[in-house]
Image (spheres, helix red, strand yellow):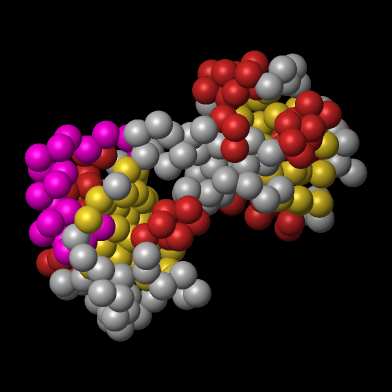
Amino acid sequence: MGKLVVVPTPVGNLQDMTFRAVEVLKSADLILAEDTRTSGNLLKHFGIETKMMSHHKFNEHATIERTLDIIRANSVTAMISDAGTPSISDPGYFLTKHCVENDIEVECLPGATAFVPALVMSGFTTDRFCFEGFLPHKKGRQSRLLALKDETRTIIFYESPHRVVKTLTQIQEFIGERNVAVVREISKIYQEVVRGSIPTVIKHFQEKQPKGEFVLLVAGKEDTINLEDDEE
């Protein structure tokens, strides 16, 4: 019986790749990759020549039985996404769920996940937090935000650059006045942290076009941190 190993990859800086991750990818029989072109660049950088197979949200349901058979037939099948830890707002959950249900061993290496450094850099409470991932684009968006109106934990969202201002505006409308921190391009050369009131942060990104990958953090309702508007 083979096993599935979930392998995190860097969210930006390639030096964040762990020695163990490289070793696992080199020794695996097969790598399941979200985008083989993107992952191909990563593997080439680390001299990894293991065969890859495409595995993403558009094919994972249709190919699940075949994929399970492949994992059973191999000693080790590794799974990676374009960046970060598979299944955290990335493909991966569906496959790991079915592996567990079929008594296939699943292992996950520790490694990069964008919301953890963003949470630490936010200055908000870190002992209790609520990770919401990406909001629905249309249906269910308002109700999901309204459900967080009385949330006392730090709230974390992922967002694309062209929706950042819209999302901040809706957070103010449906959750209320809170301090926020917006972190973009984590671990990359243009990493930026913008903290402050929602209107201040909106103004910043209206004047400076949002680019890159974003993590939005919202202070909990009872978070009494005295956070002045600032940016890095």
Q: Nearer the viewer, residue 163 or 101?
A: 163
Q: Position of residue 98 (x, y in %)?
A: 68, 52
In the rendered structure, the answer to whether residue 61 lies left or right of residue 74 reads left
Residue 221 lies in quadrant: bottom left
Q: Position of residue 200 (x, y in %)?
A: 12, 57
Which residue appears at 63% of the width and 18% of the height? Answer: 45
On the question of residue 191 being in view, the answer is yes
Number of numbered discs present? 0
In the rendered structure, the answer to whether residue 33 lies left or right of residue 139 reads right
Q: Over which residues does the magenta segment extend?
A: 195-213
Residue 119 lies in quadrant: bottom left
Residue 69 lies in quadrant: top right
Q: Position of residue 211 (x, y in %)?
A: 27, 34
Q: Nearer the viewer, residue 121 or 68?
A: 121
Q: Is residue 55 above or below residue 139?
A: above
Which residue appears at 63% of the width and 47% of the height? Answer: 111
* Quarter of the figure that contains the N terminus: top right
Which residue appears at 80% of the width and 50% of the height? Answer: 104
Which residue appears at 76% of the width and 51% of the height? Answer: 106
In the rendered structure, the answer to whether residue 231 lies left or right of residue 191 reads left
Q: Is residue 150 above or below residue 54?
A: below
Q: Position of residue 204 (x, y in %)?
A: 14, 47
Q: Report if residue 11 lies within the magenta region.
A: no
Q: Report if residue 209 lies within the magenta region.
A: yes
On the question of residue 58 being in view, the answer is no
